[in-house]
């Protein structure tokens, strides 16, 4: 018994947590541990046996044990002078030294801005400033035309504002930095363009699965493949229907002016945090490059800290950001939760602009820059006495079908105008189909490769339709 | 040693039911469990539990968050270092650990691994090298040995499948990391070294000194198809000769890392974006004329002609005058190749179509631009060109107003040929009376308020251009 007089704690084993790997057996130079001879009825393996007469308390066996609740040091028992009882380790060692409290939600704060003279800004810069106004101080990106101006401005602004801009090794790394920063509960964003957006889809699927917020500004360019750097709208399908693998959706916002680049980027962050889901801003190449008048909003945001964040302090310690749900029923339940979220977004967050739609017989449907050409065409058509209107979806997913349905009884023709081979029209048709509505005839003006539909061709289509009615 | 950094009860492991509530999902004798214990002890001993954020990978350690009572994030395959970086930059006080296996770190995530290491921000990477894919069932890893049989190298790995990647050496030769060590678990001595290395790596991060990388040669008895004891011997006898143990890099670096805190200062923000607060009752400017419905202009020239600057000045002046205006440049390789053109729209109401495929006004600085865009000018449009540079006129559309002004020559006369774009803007104003005459001067003064020395020349160039179209006796 003399060995038990030392203050050094000795190993302790709850046999239920021994996997009989025997790594501890060879670890002990004093041969205190031997392979077990009796099968444990719960685990089906024979736990090792401890004979601690010669034990020095060196702990080498404990360091060899891969099981957290396998071999442990009997700190709580050292005063018992040789007494040794097997007990449930949780009971034995009692409560944790550190107890986690529930994380409080620290709310965002709105700081008033003075009235300012309007700025004259490129769309990409307007978007960057919108993000800064939303409180975003973490920007991750990879240079790609025509989105680089956004990243370049952020590279200048972030260090001045105590934030960070990281030029990542790839878009794949950039989106995962967003996963990290977003998971820590801070507003994070990237600027990219179509080929880069493709690369980010893996990460977006993980963000949606793990419910991580973040804002993606994609200035769409010509594809497929390397395509070109001219404006297209051919990522509508990707953003609305293909955000990586699995059951994924995200709000897709489609601005059409530099002002909206700012306003919608600002809104995107709030929406992203409200739903703990990424938000996609789809601009076209023109919108990033276009300079126009931009007015600042009345406030600047100082973001708070959500209760769910994995921040790295005591109150957020119990949090987990993860998209893995191993049990089938767990994953199904998680997807049902996501579906409820998607439904709530569809119910509350759709947006559209209706321009001269009240008495329109011909409805032009267009978004982004082509919507401006379409608006011009509608103006001229009206001046010529043609009853045309523009329906501009601002959320492409969910499609603002509720704003469209009341217009349909009067509509004799829909003309979808887009710089893509029908991706916007597909969204429209899908939305109509889900609403169980047989639409009026749908025609289109489609251009591609960087050629945008022009006002004259849209106008010609409106006029042709009206002639057909007559 | 009985680490409080493990959960009391593994709630996340099959909802903590039965034995799973207190045992890991790892196979008997797996090296992961030992490293988990070392890591948990190090976090506990350094008092870092509350600050720790552990990034678990894809691989057998995907469920590290079942066990560690710290902030947890689970990353996509290979992306853990990027996720770790996001956490570290979001909260520089967090202790961020990227825990990865060989497939994750040395195959699919190699780009993230190397770039994050080279960045050198203080995070800790724990690399479990067991020379095989565990989770997917025993496939060839980037660190599998030559001759090693795996399910995807059934006859043994040969040269054509690549040689085993020595990651610790690779990382050590980068400039970013400050501490790189390869350790092992096959005997008590190695396990003590492994514990020390992991603790040191965490300490270096906690002190803000830099990036540390610990490669652990670990046992995967299951896929080696060996008992844990034989697996230990295999690591010692087969792996260690290929992956030599020891410190690969250990720099003494003073604490350097800091970032933030984020600023939400209004003054600073306004100054950075160039916004100027208005006097409380300032009325927004009203367009002087509603005659401009939606006017489109195209500026075209060679790279150095300043077409973009001229177009932007016009856009800005129009907006200052209360109009809506837009500018779209040509961009990309095209703009690098020599030609540069810009579309501008000005409207009393809202600019609808911002492109100018059929401009009302074309301002051309060189012959190719004139040849390219003149045929597109709208009926009864205006063409203004550098008459000193362009001597041969292409066929111009009938009904157009065509004005030649020697932009370059006039600018050269003022001693600054680059001011030709200002001459052009002056000529444009002279020819069209587009904006109220003082608007350009006001906008120019505003834009050059930090470089007042440039103002006289620009004003002179504008004036000279204007007069070249309208003789001084004719008021504009
Ligand atoms: S503490 Fe040391 S001496 Fe005692 S059983 Fe473990 S290895 Fe053997
Ligand atoms: S090392 Fe742990 S799990 Fe393995 S035999 Fe020993 S006590 Fe059991
Ligand atoms: S497969 Fe290998 S690495 Fe994975 S848990 Fe089992 S022993 Fe460990």
Image (cartoon, coloured by chain):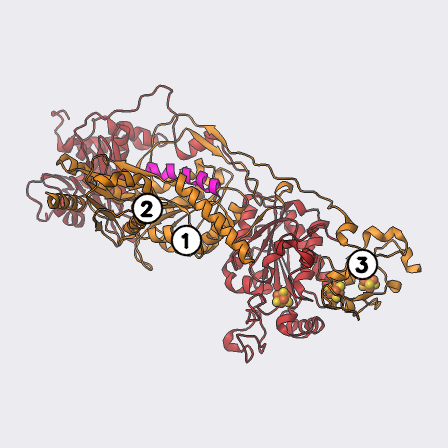
Chain colours: A orange, B red
Return the mark for residue B140. none
- The residue carrying pointer 1 sits among few (fewer than 14), some (14 to 19) or many (20 or more) residues within 10 Å by Cα, namely many
The quadrant in which residue B278 appears is top left
Q: Looking at the image, which residue sits at the far bottom?
A: B155
Q: Which is more foreground, mark 3 or mark 2?
A: 2
Q: Is residue A392 above or below residue B8?
A: above
Residue in front for this viewpoint, B394 or B185: B185
Q: Which residue is mark 3?
A: A12
- The residue carrying pointer 3 sits among few (fewer than 14), some (14 to 19) or many (20 or more) residues within 10 Å by Cα, namely many
- The residue carrying pointer 2 sits among few (fewer than 14), some (14 to 19) or many (20 or more) residues within 10 Å by Cα, namely few
Q: Which is more foreground, mark 2 or mark 1?
A: 2
C-alpha distance separating marks 3 and 2:
66 Å
Q: Which comes sooner in the sequence, label 2 or label 1?
A: 1
The quadrant in which residue B466 appears is top left
Specify whether tag 2 is near ligand 3 (CB below 8 Å): no
**Disc 3 sits on a residue from what chain?**
A
Local secondary structure at mark 1: loop
Residue in front for this viewpoint, B423 or B335: B335
Residue in front for this viewpoint, B426 or B271: B271
Residue A221 on image: x %, y %: 31, 52
Residue range of the region highlighted in magenta in the rendering: A258-275
Q: How many marks?
A: 3
C-alpha distance separating marks 2 and 1:
23 Å
Return the mark for residue A243. 1
């Amino acid at each position: 018994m003399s060995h038990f007089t030392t203050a050094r704690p000795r190993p302790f084993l709850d046999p239920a947590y021994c996997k009989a790997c025997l790594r501890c057996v060879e670890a002990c130079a004093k041969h205190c541990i031997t392979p077990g001879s009796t099968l444990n009825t719960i685990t089906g393996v024979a736990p090792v046996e401890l004979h601690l007469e010669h034990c020095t308390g060196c702990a080498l066996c404990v360091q060899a044990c891969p099981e957290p609740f396998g071999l442990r040091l009997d700190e709580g028992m050292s005063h018992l002078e040789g007494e040794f009882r097997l007990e449930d380790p949780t009971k034995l060692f009692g409560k944790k030294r550190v107890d986690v409290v529930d994380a409080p939600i620290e709310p965002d704060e709105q700081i008033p801005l003075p009235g300012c003279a309007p700025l004259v800004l490129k769309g990409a810069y307007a978007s960057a400033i919108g993000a800064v106004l939303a409180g975003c101080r973490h920007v991750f990106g990879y240079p790609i035309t025509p989105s680089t101006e956004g990243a370049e401005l952020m590279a200048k602004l972030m260090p001045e504002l105590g934030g960070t801009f990281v030029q990542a090794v790839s878009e794949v790394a950039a989106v995962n930095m967003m996963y990290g920063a977003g998971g820590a509960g801070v507003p994070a964003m990237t600027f990219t363009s179509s080929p880069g957006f493709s690369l980010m889809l893996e990460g977006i699927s993980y963000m949606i699965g793990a419910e991580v917020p973040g804002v993606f500004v994609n200035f769409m360019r010509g594809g497929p493949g390397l395509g070109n750097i001219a404006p297209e709208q051919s990522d509508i399908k990707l953003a609305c229907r293909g955000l990586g693998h699995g059951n994924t959706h995200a709000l897709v916002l489609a601005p059409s002016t530099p002002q909206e680049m700012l306003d919608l980027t600002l809104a995107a962050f709030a929406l992203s945090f409200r739903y703990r889901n990424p938000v996609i801003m789809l601009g076209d190449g023109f919108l990033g490059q276009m300079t126009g008048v931009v007015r600042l909003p009345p406030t600047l945001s100082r973001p708070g800290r959500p209760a769910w964040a994995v921040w790295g302090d005591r109150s957020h310690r119990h949090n987990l950001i993860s998209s893995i749900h191993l049990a089938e029923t767990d994953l199904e339940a998680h997807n049902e939760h996501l579906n409820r979220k998607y439904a709530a977004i569809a119910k509350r967050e759709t947006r559209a602009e209706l321009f001269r739609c009240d008495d329109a017989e011909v409805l032009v449907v267009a978004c982004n820059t082509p919507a401006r050409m379409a608006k011009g065409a509608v103006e001229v058509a009206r001046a010529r006495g043609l009853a045309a209107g523009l329906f501009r979806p601002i959320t492409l997913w969910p499609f603002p079908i509720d704003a469209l349905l009341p217009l349909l009884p009067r509509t004799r023709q829909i003309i979808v105008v887009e710089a893509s081979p029908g991706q916007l029209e597909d969204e429209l048709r899908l939305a109509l189909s889900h609403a169980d509505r047989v639409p009026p005839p749908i025609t289109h003006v489609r251009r591609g490769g960087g050629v945008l539909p022009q006002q004259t061709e849209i106008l010609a289509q409106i006029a042709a339709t009206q002639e057909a009615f007559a | 040693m009985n680490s409080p950094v493990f959960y009391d009860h593994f709630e996340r492991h099959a909802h903590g039911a039965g034995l799973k509530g207190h045992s890991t999902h790892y196979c008997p004798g797996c090296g992961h469990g030992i490293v988990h214990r070392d890591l948990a002890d190090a976090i506990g001993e350094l008092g870092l539990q509350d600050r720790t954020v552990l990034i678990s990978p894809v691989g057998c350690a995907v469920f590290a968050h079942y066990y560690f009572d710290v902030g947890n994030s689970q990353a996509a395959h290979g992306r853990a270092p990027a996720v770790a970086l996001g956490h570290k930059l979001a909260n520089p006080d967090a202790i961020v650990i990227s825990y990865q296996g060989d497939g994750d770190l040395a195959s699919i995530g190699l780009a993230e691994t190397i770039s994050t290491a080279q960045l050198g921000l203080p995070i800790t990477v724990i690399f479990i090298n067991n020379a095989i894919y565990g989770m997917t069932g025993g496939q060839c890893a980037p660190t599998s040995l030559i001759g090693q049989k795996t399910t995807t190298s059934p006859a043994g790995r040969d040269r054509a499948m690549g040689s085993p990647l020595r990651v610790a050496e690779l990382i050590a030769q980068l400039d970013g990391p400050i501490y790189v060590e390869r350790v092992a678990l096959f005997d008590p001595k190695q396990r003590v070294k492994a514990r020390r290395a992991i603790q040191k790596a965490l300490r270096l991060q906690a002190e803000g000194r830099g990036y540390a990388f610990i490669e652990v040669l670990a046992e995967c008895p299951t896929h080696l198809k060996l008992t844990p004891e034989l697996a230990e011997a295999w690591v010692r006898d087969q792996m260690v000769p290929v992956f030599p143990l020891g410190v690969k890099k250990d720099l003494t670096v003073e604490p350097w890392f800091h970032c933030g805190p984020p600023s939400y200062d209004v003054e600073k923000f306004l100054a950075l974006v160039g916004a100027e607060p208005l006097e409380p009752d300032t009325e927004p400017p009203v367009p002087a004329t509603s005659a401009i419905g939606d006017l489109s202009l195209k500026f075209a020239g060679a790279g150095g002609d300043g077409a973009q600057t001229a177009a932007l000045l016009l856009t800005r002046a129009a907006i200052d005058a209360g109009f809506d205006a837009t500018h779209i440049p040509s961009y990309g390789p095209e703009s690098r190749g020599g030609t540069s053109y810009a579309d501008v729209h000005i409207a009393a109401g809202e600019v609808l179509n911002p492109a100018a495929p059929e401009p009302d006004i074309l301002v051309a600085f060189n012959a190719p631009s004139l040849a390219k865009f003149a045929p597109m000018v709208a009926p009864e449009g205006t063409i203004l060109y550098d008459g000193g540079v362009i001597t041969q006129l292409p066929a111009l559309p009938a009904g157009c107003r065509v004005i030649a002004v020697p932009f370059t020559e006039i600018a050269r006369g003022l001693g600054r040929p680059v001011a030709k774009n200002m001459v052009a803007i002056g000529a444009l104003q002279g020819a069209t009376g587009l904006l109220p005459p003082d608007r350009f001067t006001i906008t120019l003064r505003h834009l050059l308020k930090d470089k007042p020395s440039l103002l006289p020349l620009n004003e002179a160039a504008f004036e000279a251009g204007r007069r070249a179209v309208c003789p001084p006796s004719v008021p504009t």
